Image (spheres, rainbow, N blue to C red):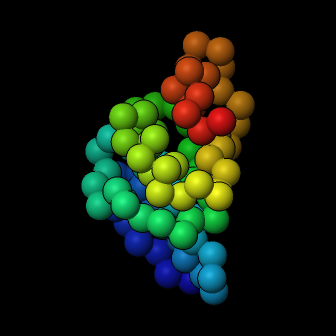
Amino acid sequence: MQLTHFGHSCLLAAFDHTAVLFDPGNFSHGFEGISGLAAILITHQHPDHVDTARLPALIDANPAPPCMPIRRPPPSSARRVRPCG
């Protein structure tokens, strides 16, 4: 397995032919434009763990993988992950 840290909370875990991106938040940089992801995982809905301004482009670059929060977000923050589907 190879781990790549993009600052703060964002990690890319790659193993065999699978890559998973964790917490692409607003304090992290360099994950923009990554493609070929199996999943985008968001641990919780704080801006430093999910940058809602950059998330749509990341999803567009990776149309196949699910983008999912680890836990169901409370109604007050559900709109933040709405671009995930």
Of the pair 63 and 72, the residue shown nearer to us: 63
Residue 26, given in percent of the width and then of the height, sits at 32, 41
Q: Which residue is at the far top? A: 76
- Residue 67 position within the rendered picture, expressed as x and y whole percent measured from the top left: 62, 47
Nearer the observer, 44 or 35: 35
| Corner quadrant of residue 17 | bottom right
Which residue is painted at 59% across and 28% down in the image?
Answer: 82
Q: Is residue 29 left or right of residue 46?
A: left
Image quadrant where residue 48 sits = top left
Residue ID at (47%, 75%): 3
In the image, residue 60 sits, relative to residue 13, either above or below, namely above
**Furthest residue in direction right, as rendered:** 72
- Which quadrant, please, contains the C terminus? top right
Which corner quadrant of the image does residue 74 belong to? top right
- Asked if residue 68 is positioned above or below residue 30 in the image, the reply reads above
Residue at the image position 56 percent from the left and 21 percent from the top = 79
Left-right relation of 52 to 7: right
Q: Is residue 64 left or right of residue 81?
A: right
Residue 48 appearing in the image? no
Q: Is residue 37 above or below residue 84?
A: below
In this rendering, position of residue 42 left or right of residue 71: left
Which residue is pictured at 44% across the width and 42% down the height?
A: 55
